[in-house]
Amino acid sequence: MPLALLWVVTPSTEVCSGLGVTDSLVGRSISNGRSKRISKKQENLNSWRLNVAKPKNRSERYPVLSSMVANPTGEMAVLSSEQRVYDVVLKQAALVNRELKKREDLDLDVKPDIAVPGTLSLLGEAYDRCGEVCAEYAKTFYLGTQLMTPTRRKAIWAIYVWCRRTDELVDGPNASHITPTALDRWEARLEDLFSGRPFDMLDAALCDTVTRFPIDIQPFKDMIEGMRLDLRKSRYKNFDELYLYCYYVAGTVGLMSVPVMGIAPESKAPTESVYNAALALGIANQLTNILRDVGEDSRRGRVYLPQDELAQAGLSDEDIFTGKVTDKWRNFMKKQIKRARMFFDEAEKGVSELSAASRWPVWASLLLYREILDEIEANDYNNFTKRAYVSKAKKLLALPIAYAKAKLPPRSISSMSKV
């Protein structure tokens, strides 16, 4: 994920968020007695934990299935990465459907604010800080979130900040100091957060978010798994392996966001199809990142391209490290770009099914990211020394197009009306 620096990680695994908060991955919660100095704000946060952030009933946990299952003959069959991920999609959709049914019975949209004296101002400050980070590092997306309802807008900011912080653990300038143990502690901290025990102010914003929307912990844990892959893996032997990595580091964001974005009340599309489209957008975005950053990644000793497809094209890692554009490379890139565009096409099917107030930022993200592929082509497939980027003029042009698309009714409705 192409995220700019938010965290500075020291050799002692202390993490300074760059947001005025210093945390330690060694300690799991500032309420566990390990912190000797507690500020007034931290006291308020502790109170907030006890009174507001009660753990939800999360007895169901959805791990990614094992890659091996028994077939009717008793032999073991290997599930593809897409099948494994789709199982997660189905279970996330089922969670949303249960929650929507519950809220229909109660005639609720999202859970109401719970006013606890001395806590709402702190929580408001946490959400405001998340919004500032989003505005600084994701300007176009932040602009789009202004069309959302205040509750949904703040929730998306909180999710964005958590994803950004997670990514910086292994992608920041001090990533060499991060170990698998540090990621284990980050995951334990995530579990505390989902149990109503946030570590800091920014965690508190996400903790509040997951009490308001039917968001499951699994996509968050899967993103951390993607960070673990980056620590131990720098090659992917085929697209099946690469697909799973793309799901971990980007597809998960779609699964986190759909419950907050909301599905249009008039949509007739199955919930799982909307989730699948969100997943496809994450995969498409990450494949685009990979194709754009081939040269940059190679200078770090990483090749995020299917090794078997490179070999079929008559290419090797050495060709990538050399960084010379040849006809073999152009032909290889054409096939990779075609695949990424197929995922963008799949994603389009679900964007129009989102709630009206949530479509614009998603359409903007889709259109702008897809244009990066056009820029790679315009650079004659030289992604070794030239970085493909969308100009400011093209970005400005894309915004009204995205806005116009966001105004269209759900496809499931418009397509039915033509029958």
Image (cartoon, rainbow, N blue to C red):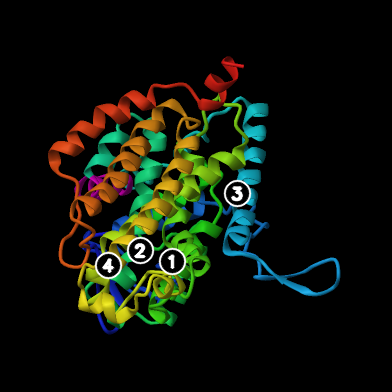
Dots 4, 3 in contact, CB < 8 A: no
Q: Nearer the viewer, mark 1 or mark 2?
A: 2
* Badge 1 density bin: few <14, some 14–19, many ≥20, Cα 10 Å: some
Q: Earlier in the sequence, mark 1 or mark 2?
A: 1
* Badge 4 density bin: few <14, some 14–19, many ≥20, Cα 10 Å: many
Gap between marks 1 and 2, in whole Å?
54 Å
For mark 1, what is the residue? 31
- Residue 137 belongs to the span the image colors magenta: yes
Q: Nearer the viewer, mark 2 or mark 3?
A: 2
Disc sitting over residue 136 in the figure: none
- Residue 224 belongs to the span the image colors magenta: no
Q: Earlier in the sequence, mark 2 or mark 4?
A: 4
| Residue 134 image offset from top left, x and y in percent | 26, 47
Q: Is residue 304 visible?
A: yes
Q: Nearer the viewer, mark 4 or mark 1?
A: 4
Q: Is residue 192 visible?
A: no
Q: Nearer the viewer, mark 2 or mark 4?
A: 2
Highlighted magenta segment, given as a residue range: 125-138
Task: Say what amino acid the circle numbered 1 marks.
Answer: Ser
| Residue 160 image offset from top left, x and y in percent | 35, 51
Task: Say what amino acid the circle numbered 3 marks.
Answer: Gln
For mark 4, what is the residue? 294
Dots 4, 1 in contact, CB < 8 A: no
Report helix, strand or loop for mark 4.
Answer: helix
Task: Say what amino acid the circle numbered 4 marks.
Answer: Val
Find residue 403 and report its image quarter: top left
Q: Nearer the viewer, mark 4 or mark 3?
A: 4
Report helix, strand or loop for mark 2.
Answer: helix
- Where does the C terminus fall, quadrant-wise? top right
Label tally: 4
Gap between marks 2 and 4, in whole Å?
13 Å
Disc sitting over residue 92 in the figure: 3
